[in-house]
């Protein structure tokens, strides 16, 4: 009997979170956590509770607007060096959204290593915005090219990071945001003071901030005043914007 070839893995879109709208007007692709190097499949318990909570929040907020929210199911857990497999899967997923729903605006929303994937894949022609929550970014090294930012030109970008994050360095996301802001004024970054990687202490505020941003970039809803101010402010002010306790309790659309 001849030896059978190992089947190639392929990325997939998870089922739409919540009731799928009859007519889709915009889409969010959720990009979960990953690892720096790994050829293993994602865990059956993946994505994390924080990613699922973000998906539910956005699906509820955008239901009447025709928002479809999907989790991207990666081929592998790892970024895997120059292969940048999680970013490649994000780009594939954006193509899949176009195939399923047509020419609708797409927001890439990534957490941890998924945040890095969202930033890298932000140049896809269907993508109009990028949301990166506690993004994992590599340590800066003079021998390695810096993380790219030119692909973010023409996109609105929001980065959210806890100041006490011990897994992903918030200073690295600030430096990336500062470089991106030079090429694209529509970049802002919020700091969640005293919170860690999972942003558990201020989860409600973080989810409301993400909702505010996504509804604005995909459907033209008015941003809250803090988001407007962060986008308009020059660096470093708009890139070290503190997320106020209680954010979202009195947002007006």
Image (tube, grey):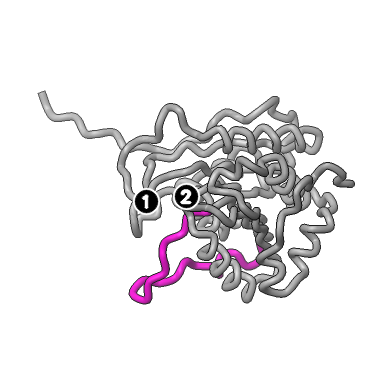
Range of the magenta residues? 135-155
Identify the residue at horizontal 40%, vertical 31% (top origin).
43
Q: Are marks 1 and 2 in contact (CB under 8 Å)?
A: yes
Q: Position of residue 149 (x, y in %)?
A: 54, 68
- Against 166, residue 228 (above or below) is below
Looking at this rendering, what residue extends furthest in the top direction?
1
Does the image show residue 231? yes
Q: Nearer the viewer, residue 54 or 191?
A: 191
Q: Quadrant of residue 101?
A: top right
- Residue 146 on the magenta span: yes
Q: Quadrant of the N terminus?
A: top left
Is 5 on the left-hand or right-hand side of 110? left
Q: Which mark is residue 113?
A: 2
Mark 2, residues whose alpha carbon is within 10 Å: few (<14), some, or many (≥20)? many
Considering the whole magenta stretch, tell me its main secondary structure. Answer: loop
Mark 1, residues whose alpha carbon is within 10 Å: few (<14), some, or many (≥20)? some
Identify the residue at horizontal 50%, vertical 49% (top origin).
112
Q: Which mark is residue 36?
A: 1
Label located before the other in sequence (1 or 2): 1
Q: Position of residue 214 (x, y in %)?
A: 72, 48
Identify the residue at horizontal 12%, vertical 28% (top origin).
2
Q: CA distance from mark 1 to mark 2?
A: 8 Å
Q: Position of residue 29 (x, y in %)?
A: 59, 43
- Against 84, residue 60 (above or below) is above
Looking at this rendering, what residue extends furthest in the right direction?
252
């Amino acid at each position: 009997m001849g030896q059978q070839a190992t089947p190639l893995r392929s990325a997939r879109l998870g089922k739409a979170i919540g009731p799928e709208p009859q007519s889709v007007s915009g889409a969010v692709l959720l990009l979960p956590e990953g690892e720096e190097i790994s050829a293993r499949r994602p865990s059956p318990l993946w994505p994390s509770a924080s990613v699922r909570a973000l998906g539910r929040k956005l699906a509820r907020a955008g239901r009447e607007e025709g928002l479809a929210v999907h989790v991207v199911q990666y081929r592998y857990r790892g970024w895997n060096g120059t292969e940048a497999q999680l970013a490649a899967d994000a780009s594939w997923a954006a193509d899949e959204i176009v195939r399923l729903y047509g020419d609708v605006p797409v927001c890439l929303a990534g957490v941890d290593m998924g945040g890095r994937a969202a930033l890298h894949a932000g140049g896809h022609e269907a993508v109009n915005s990028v949301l990166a929550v506690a993004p994992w970014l590599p340590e800066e090294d003079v021998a390695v090219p810096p993380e790219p930012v030119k692909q973010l030109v023409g996109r609105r970008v929001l980065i959210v990071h806890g100041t006490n994050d011990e897994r992903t360095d918030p200073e690295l996301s600030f430096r990336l945001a500062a470089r991106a802001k030079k090429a694209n004024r529509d970049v802002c970054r919020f700091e969640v003071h005293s919170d860690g990687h999972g942003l558990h202490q201020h989860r409600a505020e973080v989810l409301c901030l993400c909702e505010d941003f996504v509804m604005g970039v995909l459907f033209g809803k008015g941003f809250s005043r803090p988001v407007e101010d962060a986008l308009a402010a020059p660096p470093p002010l708009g890139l070290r914007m503190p997320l106020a306790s209680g954010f979202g309790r009195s947002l007006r659309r």
